[in-house]
Amino acid sequence: MTAMAAEKPRGIAGTISDVFFTRPQLLTLLLLLPPLLWIGVVYVGSLFALLLQSFYSLDDFSGVVVHEFTLATYSQLFEGSNVQIILRTVTMAALVTVASAIIAFPIAYYAARYARGWMKALFYLAVMMPLWSSYLVKVYAWKLILAKEGVITWFANALHLGWLLDGILALPIIGGPSLSFSYLGTFLVFVYIWLPYMILPTQAALERVPTNFIEASADLGADPGQTFRTVIFPLALPGIVAGSIFTFSLTLGDYIIPQIVGNSRLMIGQAVYTLQGTAGNIPLAAAFTVVPMVIMGFYLWMAKRMGAFDVL
Amino acid sequence: MSPAVRFQNVSRHFGSVRAVDGVSLDIEPGEFFALLGPSGSGKTTCLRLIAGFEQPDEGHIEIFGETVEGVPPYRRNVNTVFQDYALFPHMTVGENVAYGLMIKGVEKSVREAKAKDALAMVKLGGYEGRRTAQLSGGQRQRVALARALVNGPKVLLLDEPLGALDLKLREQMQEELKSLQTSLGITFVFVTHDQGEALSMANRVAIFSDGKIVQVGTPTDVYERPASRFVADFVGSSNVLPPEFAASHSGTPSWTSLRPERIEVVSDGAAIPSGYASVKGLISVISYQGAVTRITVVTEKLPLIASIPATTSLRKGDHVTLAWPKAAMVAMGESA
């Protein structure tokens, strides 16, 4: 018997493996088909249905949705209280994003550059653990912390700083009867809840800045401050932008936090919730939903234009 | 004139590892100086000590007569070409080269002109607007070189500068670096584990082993007169003869180096030339290397390696007589 140059495939599984090995495109197609169908039908499809709704309008007298194309619903977005809702939400989202970035950066920087071994494990644990518990529970916990009878008031009084807290609450716009009924409180809870989404991408971006870039910068005469501004920060920017996409869009769409902690003025999420529920105004709810999408699209376009993704 | 770089009894420890252990060294201005040694021998740490990325635990370092203890890298007038070049990916080639000048606050038009000149000097004229990701390894190497040289350093440090390049490009860059150094007159200090590179480029070589310098000298010095068995073995290849063998072949009774290319094969019956030592043996390995053929000959006492012309008709298993000039035996120090 002569030795064969090639072995026979081993069973049906072997034959299938051989087919996939020689035709990798076939394997890719098979692997991608289910998720593509899901995204296409369930995800993009429903988004498209939503978009369609926003071009309908609600008949004021009968409360019935008129299935005719119109831009009337969109024009309602620019009316008094609706514009206020949009501006309020966008301002809040922007402030939450900036504050998250400022708080997250030093933490991410430490974790990426200095933390090793168990310190690194502790970092991941500390950042991720809040994500393991219920979002609702955390928000209610914050309501208690921020309440007039809560820990913060108690602590401020114990330190004889009650006057400071009262002073802050007396500030126009951001203040209120107590922290849990103020924009400041809403802001604090937003920052707390979304912070991990800012820390992790920032840390990942910093992690990818090799030490020898920093050494090269120092070698070329840059002091640590200059190195930070010209090398580390620009290279971390894609991570910060990625994080800001999370914090910004999550704040834009959230309707639970402002409902539990904050004054009674609506955010976009709450407006959508109310409009599609009790008011039954699906077209306006849909139009409101389109607002964050447009804002995010614009934001990403700006970020790209400013070169935030050049080093990706 | 004070030396370009002076190490006085410098040590640097990492935990219990003495990466650099009591090194004293003077590098003269305008030298092309090689720090040669196997990996982990302390040569790169020495380079980093000059650059300022490391501080010595003991000893004293001067650059052009000025002590640099406590002086951070950004206040030292030396520049480094990093092993993997460390080009900034978020800047164009031109911005990379102009970086040091930008940091110094040089006006934009001036630094752009200087960057352009520096790039032309490394034969990359017109590449200013490119992204570093679009460059080949050899081009990155040149950009890194231009980026360092544009600052007019007093000492240029090169960390395994040619390590990542393929053979042909490496040979070409060796020549270019050498002519660049000659025309600029700047002191070049480079780290390499490639003895061929060190011998062909450097004016002087310091050979490192276990954090210590074992020999400093010109390439001829270290090749022809290795100070120790380590040097003989590391720089080129060598037959290291034990004292008794050397003595019995009219050498001095000490460890002795005998380079393979000094050994000849004497045809049967021919007389041994005067002034030559000889030994009989059997060819156990024969390996064709293009320019030469290398044979391993088992003799009574020890195997000897000889480089002979590639045109040889000898075969494995042939009995041969090896002969070499007695002057080719170089007595070395006792140290390993």
Image (cartoon, coloured by chain):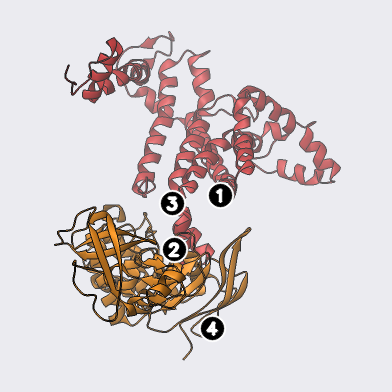
Q: Local crowd at mark 4 within 10 Å, few (<14), some, or many (≥20)?
A: few
Which of discs 2 and 3 lies nearer the camera? The answer is 2
Which numbered tag is attached to residue B151? none
Mark 2: amino acid: Ala
- The first of marks 2 and 3 along the sequence is 2
Q: Local crowd at mark 2 within 10 Å, few (<14), some, or many (≥20)?
A: many
Q: Quadrant of the rendered structure where residue B28 is?
A: bottom left
Q: Local crowd at mark 1 within 10 Å, few (<14), some, or many (≥20)?
A: many
Which of discs 2 and 1 lies nearer the camera? The answer is 2
Task: Please name the color used to draw chain A.
Answer: red
Chain under disc 1: A
Mark 1: amino acid: Tyr
Identify whether A285 is placed above or below B212: above
From the image, tell me which residue sits under label 4.
B66
Per the image, label 2 sits on a secondary structure element best described as helix
Marks 4,2: beta carbons within 8 A = no
Per the image, label 4 sits on a secondary structure element best described as strand
Going by the picture, which residue comes out furthest to the front? Answer: B269
